[in-house]
Image (cartoon, helix red, strand yellow):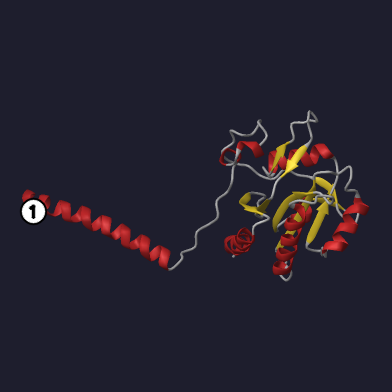
Amino acid sequence: MLSFFKDYKYFAIVFAILSLIIMSIIYNIYDVYKPLPIYQPAMVNTEMVDSTIQYKKKYHKIADFSLINQNGHTITQDSYKDKIYVADFFFTTCQTICPIMTDHMVLIQKEIMNDADIMLLSHSVTPGIDNVAQLKKYALKKGVIDTKWNLVTGDKKQIYNLARKSYLAVKTSGTGDEYDMIHTENFMLIDKKKQIRGFYDGTNPDDISRLLEDIEILKEEYK
């Protein structure tokens, strides 16, 4: 009897391995739903993360905020309650990557126009220049639709802290001004629980396509 089980032990091991391989192939063929990751500070390039939270491995969420949009309205977390949204950092006088990023945000705006669950949020990193009038001028020029997309300005320290401690999205400038920052091309996908679910190169068309696909994947969590 013992020899019988011994003879079949190796068969059982091989069978188990083959079963796992077959299941993996089937899983990929049928594109089984795979949830997006939840990004934590410890998972992100330390250049983008404030030193006080670089160790953090769980429970990271976007902090509460109060900023002013292109229409002079106060925008807070409540403005995005129960919404999925795409966030970025920019400034209206930028002549390098910002125009490309903004054009891609316009494209995303077009794709989400009829989806009430999705919004956009762009933060100015030069709030001293980008007052309400400047943001409104920029919004009209770029075709920003107020109900879908807020361009926000406000206290520089608050924007800096959001960028470095919440969205994990900008570098410090190293100029000596503690609140100076170098915005990057990053777009961040934020879920309804205020968690970061994806980072994307806002200048790369392929990443924009991936972002739109990830929005659809994220929406599956709320069905």
* 72 left or right, relative to 164: right
Label 1 crowd (10 A; few <14 / some 14-19 / many >=20): few
- Tell me the residue that label 1 is attached to: 4
Q: Position of residue 178 (x, y in %)?
A: 78, 30
Amino acid type, label 1: Phe
Q: Residue furthest top?
A: 176
Q: Secondary structure at mark 1?
A: helix
Image label count: 1
Q: Which one is in front, 6 or 160? A: 160
For residue 141, what is the image quadrant?
bottom right
Q: Position of residue 183 (x, y in %)?
A: 73, 44
Q: Which one is in front, 204 or 12? A: 204
Q: Is residue 39 above or below residue 110?
A: above
Q: Position of residue 110 (x, y in %)?
A: 73, 68
Q: Residue at x 86, y 44 (%)?
A: 127
Q: Is residue 28 above or below residue 128?
A: below
Q: Residue at x 69, y 50 (%)?
A: 185
